[in-house]
Amino acid sequence: MPFKGVAALLTLSSVGITLLLAQSPAVKPTPAPKAAAATVAANDPFKKTVQPFLAGRCYGCHSGDVPMAGLNLAAYGSEAAAEQKPEVWEKVLEKLKAGKMPPAGQPVPPKAEVAPVTGWIEGFLASANSGKAFDPGRVTARRLNRVEYDNTIRDLLGVAGHPSKDFPVDDSGYGFDNNGDVLSVSPLLMEKYMAAARTVSEVAVYGETYPSKPGRLIRLLNRRSPDADDVLQAGNAGIWLPYSLRGAMYGNWTFPVDAEYEFRLRIANFRGDNGDLVDQTPEEKAKAAAERRKQFEARAAGRGPGGGRGPRPAATPEQLKARDEAARKAAPPRKLILTVDGAPIITTVVEGTGAYGYSNGELTARVKVTAGEHFLRASFPELADLDDPQSNINPDMRRGLFVDYLEIVGPYNPDASHPASYKKIFICGEHTPQCARKIVSNLMERAWRRPVTEQELASKLNLVTSAQKDGETFDGGIRLALEAILASPEFLFRIERDPRPAAIVAAAAATRPAAHYVNDYELASRLSYYLWATMPDEELYKTAKAGKLRQPDVLQAQVRRMLADPKSQNLVDNWAAQWLQLRNLGRTKPDPKRFPNVDDELLDAMRKETNLFVSEIVQKDRSILDFIDAPFTYVNGPLARHYGIKGVNGEEFQRITLDGDKRGGVLTQASILTVSSYPTRTSPPVRGKWVLENLLGAAPPPPPDNVPALNDSNIGTEVSMKERFAQHRRDPSCSPCHNVMDPIGFGLENYDAVGRWRDFDGKFPIETTGQLPGGKTFTGSKGLKEILRERSDEFVHNVTVKMFTYALGRGLEHSDDATVDSIVQDVKGQNYKFSSLVLDVVNSKQFQMRSVETANNKSREIAQK
Amino acid sequence: MTFIQKRQLARRTFLRGAGGVLALPLLDAMIPALGKAAVSKSPTRMAILYFPNGVQPDSWIIPTTTDSMPLPEKFPRTLQPLETYRNDISLLGGLTVDGGRAKGDGPGDHGRAGASYLTGAHPKKTFGKDLQAGESMDQHAARALNGATRFASLELGTEEGIQGGNCDNGYSCAYSNSISWRTPNTPNPPEIRPRAVFERLFGSGEMERDPVVRARRQRQEASVLDSVLGDAKRLEGAVGPTDRRKIDEYMTAVRDIETRIQRTEQHNAQSVNPSMDEPANSIPENYVEHTHIMFDLMTAAFQTDSTRIVTFLMNIEQSNRAYREIGIADSHHGLTHHGGDKEKIEKCILINTYQVEQFAYFIGKLKATKDGDGTLFDRIMVTYGSGLGRDHDHDNLPLVLTGKGNGVFNLGRRIQYAKDTPLANLHVAMMDQMGVQVEQFADSNGKLDYLTNL
């Protein structure tokens, strides 16, 4: 962005300018001739006022080869140099006005000294925006990401499953993986697109492949331990489902065809493993158990005598019988349930045995299942209420009771008629060119999300006819056209077109960037990919086609309809999960040695809690301040026990009301507390940074790479975390940031690295009172949330930025600031309702318009780099 | 077991059911082993193995008195797994990637290390728009060798790339997720799924056996490619410059596939029996198993001359993986910020050594794999290294060279280059040996000495 210099400043009237003018009666000629530099300095507000301030107050950290936060203020030697980087000065302004800089511990400059500097920056930023047309920005053609691809295929053809599962990970930009600039097409991805187009078109036309005779389709197994090693030794060829301390097994599986399937399930019942110890005293039992565990661990570590189990003492039949009986009595009967999408298929009761439990063989049931993905779960529901899940763990580390495997056998009596997708494609039945035309144009219009031209249609119809000439059937020809439609850039990218040829626009826009409304189809796609991460449905598309989508009441009604639709879950799974960094949960699992009760299932429960919580905010149109604190959450039996919440039993999630004492809002949810911790311990700075970055949008600058790490070896034993960090913070190169981050993180120290409540860390009592720069003190998560509520403007601003970035699929620019600010004000006036945020985003010019890319603004952009 | 689908053709699972060695019917041709031509003149291959987060110098560096000297009897700890291969490796010291240095951009050494290692570029600090590094050495060579093999190059890895824009102090995750860059703006993300690599190389068992149907399929595939290229061309004229870049990316990728199909046809006369089993359809979690199967796949790819250039990211830069297999629950990256803590340093060394052990497996594998009248080891050039040295520095990088590079490398030595010798000089030397003459690459200022017998 070029600036017209001081001349432009004069046309504006703001506080900044008044201040500026007061100090610089003469106008600096632009550009300043170099020879006159010395004399100009007196009249140059930058040289006279700003630079001395920076040199005195800021250069100490922000200059040199390795400046703090990568910000070298000494690099801006003149107003002209400063003008090249308005974004830098925007940050400087923000920090100065908020009193965040100079950092706590440094002398606070008097207001009279700061005001001229902030005034100059404000005037300069205003001039940067003056005299320019409103610029709604321009989003780069967005490639469908993996989620969008799968959803679109599902809604277009009714083909279930995850065709994108083999695609490489999508890169993200500005925190989200729907950023047009970053989503690229590598040759590898293109190969996968071609293969997926072929497979999907085949499945859509002919149905999934399946065995001609019923057979075992899959044996589902779960992990045998919290670590993966055992899985690997088995040399498995299948799918390994999450590890559950409570012995459950769960996951999704895609059934190929409407048919009957037999489920064969076997459990392992190791609860009789201690049968030979029944006559021993508790002390002897404990000793023997400790001995076994030691032996087991020695073997596991490869130091033991040759692996395998040790010899067992021989027993008489009477002893065996007695042992069985004792085992049966010692181990209570447990209910076992297998469900498909929540509906019970097998329900039985399992008794304790001393014979390793396989004697029962397989439990089987045969039921009708429709083609597509279904959620399977086999579990012992009563174990959800174990106070300590370790009581299901035997001394040898195996679980007492667990689902050993689940086999799916079939298909029996498969439905041989065409799959549902076939009916979606073949909307007429004759094998005629007219019918082919109808089918292909319908497919193209839906897949490409717009009407197609005659030329485009002809290019795909050609494939049908040439394939038929080549000996392919009519259906086969249509399939080939479908393959090409799905592999086309028109399907894979969301492309928006300029209304007129670029050349004409460029001429008209030589002086200022032109902008235009995107057409109704493009707006429909923007809406559906924003709220649903998929293509427009029939109603939305029809509204666009009728040209009504731009009518404000119609648009609002569509948005409300879409938010109420279950597909808005995508906003939770994609927008919220990326914003809150939930996708990183479980990427590095909590250390199982330190947190033995945190299994994969509990991590999933943590994820689900936040998911349900956010869903309620979206679906019930609650206040976005609920993210900070809300009197409700969702837990099931195991998660309630993890939290120490009484009265919640069973595996199902329940909505509970909270008194706000220990829990309430995302900050106190185990998902967030875990994702902002190390696998082995909490980290107050990491949590502090999480809060600043994700809730307040004020990420602290990164530490230099060579900072000494914290000595954490004796925290909790010899020194408290707080004391250790206090030592750490004394280093002046650390203090400016850590004085902000650490107190926030310490406010959350009552929650351990997996989100459990604690009053002590090791032998040291938790101390959560902290002081923020500026002198404000607070205690614990409650105090922290109060501060966040006081700073709700910053919070709402940040949520708006995250929402806007996701909705637009591009990073925000300086030119978006005014819109963001007005959305923040409006949302505030509407009681922070979630829908008001969404509607404001949708109604913004950025969402509805795009600027035209001209040779002119393109080259300016390049010049800036 | 027979499988049907609603259409008449029996496909997809047929070969999988056959088990054992998967020989592609399409390519399982009349010639028993490698073609005769291959025997007389085996091509030079190249593999670049990268490990993240650098090393602990004291456990890696062998002190030198002269520029070049034989390797000692006893290796420093991290390198000990390579002692048996004393005569098969050289240890290169002093090489530098200047582009990885901060140059006023502040912290972010991991992002810069990954993206600069093979490109020599100073990556642009961004976590959104305007990703920019440089063309990487493997891709430069792959482009120059265009057409020699079915795959110009393979990019493999063992750790899923991170999502989330900002991975390292303002550097996009893309910088640490890939070392191979097709263009300065397009990273080549590595494939981490063994099964996917196998299927890409040797087919998925979906190949038609009926030659008539198969030929028709090939014609159909070609017509689809033509058709979508037509769509892309129409689009090219209708969009602005930024969108056009995306469409160009798409078109390049489609043309890549076209070229590969043609090559596959040309190579049909040769056998591509991979002589290994199809891997399981899951991503191994155990590091040993994962790296070994990837090494096996690389070996099979080289052996069948499916490609001559492979990059292998043995975990992404700034990896936070916990190596529980060897009893380390902490994040690797976290440990490298040890601040002098002995226990953490020890864990870093254990992880580095563990990774070197896997590298040693690959050397053994190469030596045991026949290639023409010798072994693959005789033909290949392999580097094992990291873009980070001591304390996140970018000079004196840890680097092991192995493979005889078709008879030119004089191995078994410790070679210390002058301070700040560009790593790009090694790139130039290796490309040269691949038959790709480059005057200058990135910041190179020559070709490395001491690599050959000269």
Image (cartoon, rainbow, N blue to C red):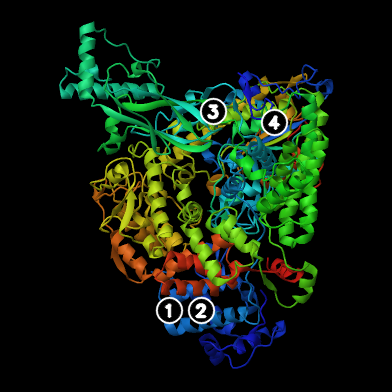
State the residue position of label 1: A109
Looking at the image, is mark 3 or mark 1 nearer the viewer?
3
Circle 3 sits in a helix, a strand or a loop, which is it? helix
Across and down, in percent, residue A283 comes to 17, 24
Q: CA distance from mark 4 to mark 1?
A: 66 Å
State the residue position of label 2: A53
Q: Is residue B11 left or right of residue B38?
A: left
Mark 2–mark 4 CB contact (< 8 Å): no
Q: CA distance from mark 3 to mark 1?
A: 60 Å
Q: Is residue B445 above or below residue A115?
A: above
- Label 3 marks which chain's residue? B
Circle 1 sits in a helix, a strand or a loop, which is it? loop
**Which residue does the image show at 24% across and 11% down from the upper left?**
A320
Mark 1–mark 2 CB contact (< 8 Å): yes
User: Badge 1: few (under 14), some or many (20 or more) residues near its Cα, within 10 Å?
Assistant: some
Q: CA distance from mark 3 to mark 2?
A: 60 Å
Circle 2 sits in a helix, a strand or a loop, which is it? helix
Q: In this rendered view, identify the residue nearer to me: A419 or A684.
A: A419
**Which residue does the image show at 52% across and 38% down from the upper left?**
B58
- Label 4 marks which chain's residue? B
